[in-house]
Image (spheres, helix red, strand yellow):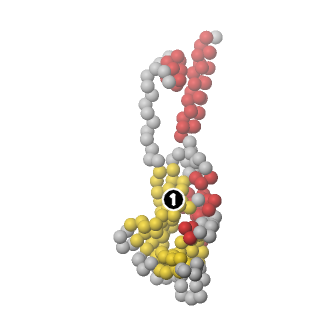
Amino acid sequence: MSNAQDLLSILGGGAPRPAPRANPTSSEKTILSFKAGKMNTELQPNGKYMVSPDNRRGEINLVWTTTNSAPSSSATASGGQLTVEWKDRRTMTTVNTYPIFPNDNATFERVETGNDADRVYLLSSGTNSSDSRHFFWMQDKENQPDEDNCVNFNLYMSDYSEAARAAGTSAPTNNNENEAADNNAELLRIMQGALGSQG
């Protein structure tokens, strides 16, 4: 093919270029999972909230969703999104989903109930509204993993790069920008060749 035909091809003329191969837009991976029941919060006439356990056998999953597009905000600074899911272990269905963003200052901490045997934890997204406070009770027979689960939970919520690393991923590149850079380099090579042939 001549230099002129190569140039036309890059600029959009000549024979049509094959379409780029389609990539999946996202992929999900559970980076932390442990048995836990959720707790129901009910507003009382005195203005306070009563917290009571939901007796269903449950599971908390911390899910990292990787996106292939370039990050567009600080919420996806590491090319993904973090979500907390509560699943009913009997039906294996996800009942509640809570998206977590870096600027939420979300925390997962043990709640002191006055009874050392209670293993109640609070997921809070940094505000005092009831919609941002979710209580859970641990259902693993052994309480030894509780502390490690809590530490990792807070690590992944506070540092998206750690969540991405736990999922075995990294921030994606912008495929469109890479393709444009390749085309510009090829265009420059052809133009230099055409000018050289005229000398």
Give the farthest residue toward the top: 199
The mark total stands at 1
In the shown orientation, is residue 57 left or right of residue 75?
left
Query: Please, is residue 174 above or below residue 131 in the view?
Result: above
Is any part of residue 144 visible from this angle?
no
Query: Please, is residue 130 above or below residue 17 in the view?
Result: below
In the shown orientation, is residue 18 left or right of residue 159?
left
Image location of residue 78, percent across then percent down = 59, 53
Is any part of residue 188 visible from this angle?
yes
Q: Nearer the viewer, residue 105 or 172?
A: 105
State the residue at coordinates (43%, 39%).
21
Q: Nearer the viewer, residue 8 or 117?
A: 117
Image location of residue 53, percent across then percent down = 47, 80
Image location of residue 136, percent across then percent down = 51, 76
Give the farthest residue toward the front: 45
State the residue at coordinates (46%, 76%).
37
State the residue at coordinates (47%, 59%).
29
Q: Nearer the viewer, residue 111 or 199?
A: 111
Neighbourhood count class around disc 1 (C-alpha, 10 Å): few under 14, some 14–19, many 20 upward: many
Query: Please, is residue 5 above or below residue 135 in the view?
Result: above
User: Which residue corresponds to mark 1?
Assistant: 64
Q: What quarter of the picture does the C terminus occupy?
A: top right
State the residue at coordinates (45%, 44%).
23
Query: Please, is residue 140 above or below residue 189 in the view?
Result: below
The amino acid at mark 1 is: Trp
Element assignment for label 1: strand
Give the farthest residue toward the left: 91
Image location of residue 39, percent across then percent down = 49, 77
